[in-house]
Image: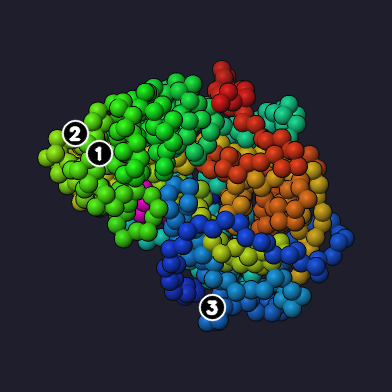
Amino acid sequence: MGLSATAQFSLWETEDTDPAPLPETTPSPKVPAPHRPRSRRRSTSAPDARVPTEVAAPQVDSTAPGTSADPAPTDASGEGAVAETRTDESDTAAARTDSAADEDAVTSDVTAAAAVGTQQSPEAPTAALAPEIMDTSSAEPGAPPIAGGTTETGSAADVTRDELESHTAAANSDAPAIVEPATPPGRIATPLPAHADEWERRLLADPDLLSDIAFAIGGPFHVMYPARVGSNIEAFRAAFAAAGVEGSIYYGKKANKAGCVVRACAEHGAGVDVASIGELTSALAQGIRGEDLMVTGPAKSDRLLWLAARHDALIAVDAPDELNRLAANGIAARVLLRVRPPNSQSRFGMTDTELDHAVTGTDLGPIRLEGFSFHLSGYEPLPRSELAAALIERCLRARDHGHRASTISLGGGFGVDYVPAEEWARFTAGTGPHWFHGGKRFDSYYPYHCATPGAAMLAAVLAHDDLAKRMRDNDIRPAIEPGRALLDRAGSTVFRVQGAKARSVQDVSYQLLTVDGTSLSLSEQWFDSEYLPDPVLWPTRPGTVTGASVGAATCLESDMLSWRRIPLPRPATAGDLLVYPNTAGYQMDSNESAFHELPLPPKVVLSDAPGGRLRWTLDAG
């Protein structure tokens, strides 16, 4: 029997009262990966020519304990696949996980088992608990399988002082041990179910809502729940309050252009960070006041600078010539000076010499210097706290020259916790081309588990070395520019299955699905990586857990939404829906295209209705 759609989300949140022991293996040492900028999409591997074109109906085979199998591929040191993480520039250039797996595209020389078994489906889609998917790929022969459960929720909303302290403490604790697979790797990937909110469970449990929306739209669509944006804003505000400071929140609009998100910001007293005339005018149209705008980005046009000054927006100046052009307008304006991070080769921000000259040697006329801003790569609280502390001293020196200098913006880059720690550790321990259609390789992944996400990360930044107290003592107001973190669990992307082919690798059957959209609407694939949180197969029907890779409705061999063989709770059929969770942050918009003259997926906005119902409308943004 297949897992219900809601159970696919709730799987990891059911309490495991008697967890199976992990195999006693010694993890390989992890070597920090060097910092590398996020790369654009490279050419993809050719499909496996040895895959038969016709096979029987999909079945998931497994190697029973004691069955002979060839050893798993290893790297040059003899160790199995080990994944590592790295970090990149800005909120959009996300940190990744480097894979050291050195396995050729799938060949007939290796025999391995599927890592997924059969499950029984709850009778009703609203079942609160679900049986766990058992992963046998990492267990010693004859050992109990590893259960895929955890009680971690990772919610960023409704944060209290105690919860913030708890999250901060968690940031300093050790991550779950990564266990190397002790048996040959399976050909079906380990599950990576996403954290989910109550609204998502309601959507999946409703017998009609998703199918009605899909019928009305007639193609792929994005689902937005702006109430969650409001909860995330309040969580950040609670973190400021717990630290005893009054901070400003500016939503990084580049993360998602939906009008409903900006409207939620206006309703909850948050500002918006914009970088173009289009974003600025759109924010105004959704109720953001001019003084609640921050205008960022390099080499701003004269027209954008003029419009921002007219609306009294806070302008983050990126270069000396930009400051000079703004001063030449002769219009009163509020500015922050963007600081280039120390020991950085970033193309953004000003050097110490440029900052000193701007403060002491430039006639700013009617321009008011409000303070300084910065953006750091990665998701570590400590470097942000240290740089903010250093900028307190710069603010005090600027005041000696008659400037107000009372704001420090910490930028964005607040982490998001997509999947539970235990499941992420299993994935990083076992990942490699053996889990991917055609033996596809990826050099890196976004770190889909974050121990200190969102508001908890802000609390950690403010707590380090009494940063919040030092800001209070010097009358300095912190500001932040989160994008992805304000969109955490605020949206999903829905595709309809249009076709399903049966394929096999090493005697393990799986499905190769085609959906009615493209990976341009799931943008991670276009950075030569993979969006890893598992899609939910809807509706619920009985069946056997079946691996599936997901392709797009284009003529491009490389256009795959999921190269990974995802363990679906049953075989997918034409007309089913695949719901990719938590895609509101950067996945929906950043690479959308009407390639093949396919329509862009519209955004459907959900709101609460009487009686616990959800109702929908199209986004007005």
Residue, far front: 328
| Amino acid bearing label 2 | Arg
Name the residue: 18% across, 43% down: 360
Would you say residue 486 sits in the magenta stretch? no
Residue, far top: 610
Rendering coords of residue 286 (x, y %)? 48, 22
Question: Is 451 placed above or below 272 here?
Answer: below
Q: CA distance from mark 2 to mark 3?
A: 58 Å
Residues at circles 2 and 1 in contact by the CB criterion of under 8 Å = yes
Q: Which residue is mark 1?
A: 371
Of the image marks 1 and 3, the number of the one nearer the N terminus: 3
Name the residue: 21% across, 48% down: 356
Q: Which residues are magenta?
A: 375-380
Q: Which residue is mark 3?
A: 79
* Left or right of residue 537: residue 291: left
Q: Residues within 10 Å of mark 2 (few under 14, many from 20)?
A: some
| Amino acid bearing label 3 | Glu
* Left or right of residue 13: residue 564: right
Residues at circles 1 and 3 in contact by the CB criterion of under 8 Å = no
Can residue 567 be seen at all in this image of the molecule?
no
Q: Looking at the rendering, which quadrant does residue 163 occupy? A: top left
Coloured how? Answer: rainbow
Of the image marks 2 and 1, the number of the one nearer the N terminus: 1
Instruction: Report the front residue among 508 and 521.
Output: 521
Instruction: Report the front residue among 48 and 362.
Output: 362
